[in-house]
Structure formats: C-alpha cells, structure tokens
Image (tube, rainbow, N blue to C red):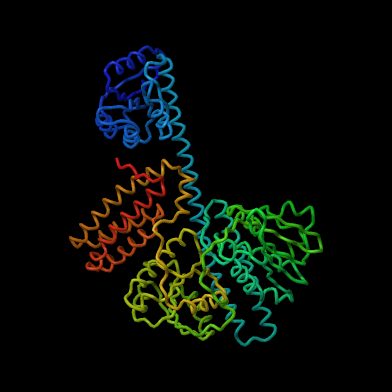
Amino acid sequence: MSPPIRILLLEDDPADARLVGQMLRRVKTTPFEVVVVSRLSEAVARLEAGSAAFDVVLADLGLPDSTGIATLDALTGAAPRLPVVVLTGNDDDAIALEALKRGAQDYLVKGIGDAFILSRVVRYAIERKLTEAALREARDTAEQAARAKTLFLAMMGHEIRTPLNGVLGMARLLMESGLDGRQRVFAETLVSSGELLLGLVNDILDFSRLDASGLTLESEPFDLIDTLEEVRLILASRADEKGLSLALRCASGLDRPVLGDRLRLRQILFNLVGNAIKFTDSGGVVVTADHLENGMVRISVIDTGIGISGEARPHLFTEFWQGDSGAARRFAGAGLGLAICARLVALMGGAIDCVSELGRGTTFMVDLPLTGRDERLPHRESPEGRPCGPHAILLVDDNQVNREVAAGLLERRGHKVSIACDGFEAVDKARSGGFDLVLLDMRMPGMDGIETARAIAALPGAAGKVPLVLLTANPMVEDEARWREVGIRGCLAKPFRIDDLGRLLAGLEDGGAATASEPPLLVPSGLQADLRDLGAERMAGLAALYRRSSFDDLVLIREHCRSGRLDDLAKVAHRMAGAASSLHLALLAARCRSLEDTARRSDSPGCAAGLDDLEELWTRSAAALDEALGGQPATSR
C-alpha cells in the first residue's frame, strides 16, 4: 500500500471538519492522515515546528484569529514549499480566486462535490507543487550555471586584458620613441595586431553577456546630436588614415535631449561606423539622423565601400558569420559585431536593417524609440576642440606593468603622475590633496577601486572632491551601479588609448572638481525590470521581508553605535546596503555604504551623527517602494 497523504486541516467549524474527514475515509485507493486545527496560530505553530510532517494544507480562510488572504499569507510564509487548498463557502468565490493568484494550488466550495473530487484535488495540488519545485530547481540550476559562466568570462576578460594592456601600452610608448622606418613598421604591426585581438575579446565578452541576459539598459536624458558628433570625432582619425571623409548630417528640428541608453547607442554606432570605414577603400562615410512618422528616430550609416551581395544579406546579423572567405581573410574579426548590434537594438525596442549593392556601398538603418525631452542639458564643449592642460594625477594600480604603461603615457603628455600600489596607500596620498584626478584600478587586493573611491570621497575638504575614474580590464554592468553610487566620474577599459584618456581629462575641465550628483531615492527602471521578471506578488513579498529585516537592522545599528561595537555596525550597514541595492533604493544604499566606511574608520561620533538622517531616509525609501509597487504598504507578517 502507498504511504498515506498527510493533511493539515485548518477548519474552525467541527461539523465541516468531520465532513472532510468522513469523505477522505471513503477513498479506498489512497490512505489519508488528517490533523485538525481550528485556529491559524495553531496551524502556523505546527508548520514552523516541522512542515515536512505534512504533504498538503486544507484551509478555511475565515477563522477566529484571521480572515481572508492574510490567512493564506501566513500559511505560505510558514511553509512556502507546502501546497495549500482553500476551502470556501458559497459566497466566498472572490476570495478563493484571489487566493489562487496569491499562491494557493486550488479551492473547493464546501458542500459541493464528493469524496472522489476532494481526493483528486488534494493529489493534484501535491503533484502541481512538486512540479513547481522541480521547475524552480531547474531554473535555479540554470541561473547558477549562467552566473558561473558570467564569472568565468569576467575572470577571463581580466586575465586577457591585463597582459594586453602591457603589450599595447609598451608598443605605443615604443612608437613615440626614436625609431627608424623599419622599426616603426614593426611597432605599428604590433599595435594593430594587439588592437585586433582586443576587439575580438571585447566582442566575445559582450556577446556572451547578451546571450546570458547580462546587460541591462539605462534610461536617462542625453543630447542625441552631441552623441553622434562624439562618435564622428573619435572615428575621424581612423577615416583620415584611409583618406576617407566622415560626415554627420542631422535633420532640422531633430530632438536633441532624448531619453534612452546613450552608452549602448554609442556602442552600436561605433560598430556600424567602424565597419563602414573598414570596408571602404575610397569615398567616405555619412551618418544621418532623421524623424520617422511613427515617432522613432532613424540613424543611418552610409558608405561607398565594397557592398554586400544579395546572398549574404540574410546572414548579416547571424552570430560568427563572416561573409565569403575572401572578405574573412582580408577583414579579420569574430563575426559578432553586427549580431551584438542587432541584440542591443532589439533590447532598446528598435529595429535594424540593411540595403546594399555589391561594389556600390552599403546603408545600415537603425530605428530607435528615442523620446524627446523638454529639459535643458548642460552644455558640453567638444574635448577635441581645445587643448587639455597638464594635470596632477594619482595613479593607483597593484600591477607594476600597468603602472609603468599608464605612467609613461601620461608623463609623455606632460602630466605629473604620483603612484600608489594599493588602495590604502592611495587614501594616504589623496589625504594630502593637490590632485586633479585619481585613476583607480578596479581589482586590487585588500581594498578594491570602488572601496578606495568611497574612502577618498569621504576625506574632508578638497581632498574628498577630487574627480575619480576607474581603470578596469573587465568592465561589468553590475559594477557600474556601484561606482556610480560612490560618485566615480567614469570608467576606462584597459588597455585604454591615450586619446580616450585625453578626452576624459579634457572633459574634467568643464566640471572641475565638482562632486557627483546624489543618487536617486529609487531607480524605477530596475524595479520595473524585477516586476517583469518576478511578478508583482513576489515583489510585494520581498518588500515585506525587506521592511521587517531592515527595520531590525536599524535597531541593531543604533545599539552597536551606542555600545561602541563599530565592527558589528559596519557589518550590519553593509548588509543593509546590499538589501537596499537589491530593491533599487539607490540613495539608501549609498548612505548605508557611507556609514559602513565611517564605522570601519572607527569614527564613532561620525556614525552617531548620521543615524537620525538614516532612519528618516529609510522611512522615505520604504514609502517610495510601497508606492512603486502599487500604493499599498507591504504586508508585515
């Protein structure tokens, strides 16, 4: 005989409880063991003592100590993996249907049905819950594998880019030394081969992140025409080397402040314009921008290059496709650039297409929903339009080769460079002030670039307002949220070109040593993405859990501050920052990390001074989260 199905029956009406027991005893094919409780508190106590003692819960939602959906919430909270079947009266259908939306497996109307129906509902509820558990386990396994893949790619990206930084940097320094004609050819070949390898690595890593849904989009106002002009200026030297013209033509009346992801648009344009230059031997490339009737913006990249055959065009956006063998030999690459563009355009809600004639040139058209904005953007003078004066720069990197490369490139441009080998030394040197810029390696032992930046930003006076820029061999979207929160101005991927650094230094002259703007209270785009992925009910549950746990953390922080246990305070603040960040409460996360830094510096008065503001900010953040999730406070069980 099969083992009995163990049922926890939550029913306050003795007659109804007896009826359920009698019906189950009539089923001869399946044995049942029924434990009856009449109050929610009894049911929760039994489940918390050991939910494994039961296979299913049959529950009337109207009880002496609880009614409605709150009863279901309490049961699923006490035993989230246990299936719940709701028992309802004839007039309770609305509540029963709501219970199904909130996680109940099924519901039965009292007085309707027989023993067979009751038995089948119970068995099916158990089977569905087991199926859900299996699917959840499979999903978790897949997500774990994806995280492992992303981590592996991050590590490999760092390991490959780090030596490339040394190779390319030293080769560029070599080209600036006194070489004869033959030696210069050797050095130029070394640089071009290294840049080709770097491009392949970047394409493969970008594609892998897109394949694993590891890239998310930002939505912020930016100047569209300035962005197009920036791409043109950066790639103009490459076109000039081939004797090509590179022009930009924008339609009159084109919206300048638009809402979208500026960095991803730049990535698409760099790829398309770079390809146009690569595949064009004479003539030139034109980038155009215009309105479409459907409210989209069309950006076209038109070249006079080799063109694309009709047979090849259907495969243009296919991964690892490189055209015919002759083109593949002449123009090396991984065949991923256009595939990455297509995926990015799709993520942005747009479309990409191509028209071409073999031997007559090619036009790529990108249609994007870049919504116009009625706000004024700060004027940004083109960095290329004026010289970049010498700067006092603090360079922080634990790798000797990286330090020598970066210092050599900077000193040749007239900058004064001070060296720090780790984050602790960097903070000590920054404390003395006098720097125009701090360049920080992202991955350093002991204190990474972001932690170092946070410590420098916390320094008093002008020393804490120096612009900070990250240098990393593996730029990750996950890190971007962290470095933006601490006020880092930008991020350069190693190996970087001196032109990239020159543009960044020139750009700093616009803003001087101004501090970064304060993070927003809530990041709506991140929360909306979680709502799509997890669903409103699960997000409401997470918000309720966050409200309870973070309130407890606030109490602990005040107790640790009062008793002087600053190490414990730092740990709680770190935990609280992580929880706030996971729910996209950016300002609260930043304040918690600042408190963590203050505690790690053993600054007890500094910790105490910010507690009232932190508690007030927590209240505002929780209210903003509740409003974003539907206007109702998260239920606290």
* Residue 28 shows in the view: yes
> Residue at 62% across / 73% down in the picture?
234
* Residue 162 shows in the view: no
Point out residue 550 in the picture as x, y percentages from the top left corner. 30, 51
Point out residue 539 in the picture as x, y percentages from the top left corner. 41, 45
User: Viewer-proximal residue, 579 or 257?
Assistant: 257
Point out residue 513 in the picture as x, y percentages from the top left corner. 42, 77
Looking at the image, residue 16 sits to the left or right of residue 605; the answer is: right
Count of numbered marks: 0
Point out residue 416 in the picture as x, y percentages from the top left corner. 46, 85
Would you place residue 350 above or below residue 113 in this image? below
Would you place residue 134 above or below residue 309 in this image? above
Q: Quadrant of residue 277?
A: bottom right
Q: Quadrant of residue 360?
A: bottom right
User: Viewer-proximal residue, 71 or 241?
Assistant: 71
Q: Considering the image in quadrants, where does the N terminus appear?
A: top left
Looking at the image, residue 556 sits to the left or right of residue 241; the answer is: left
> Residue at 50% across / 49% down in the picture?
146
Would you place residue 457 above or below residue 580 in this image? below
Looking at the image, residue 422 sits to the left or right of residue 307; the answer is: left
Farthest residue, direction left: 563
Would you place residue 379 above or below residue 346 in this image? below
Q: Considering the image in quadrants, where does the C terminus appear?
A: top left
> Residue at 45% across / 44% down in the picture?
534
Q: Quadrant of residue 611?
A: bottom left
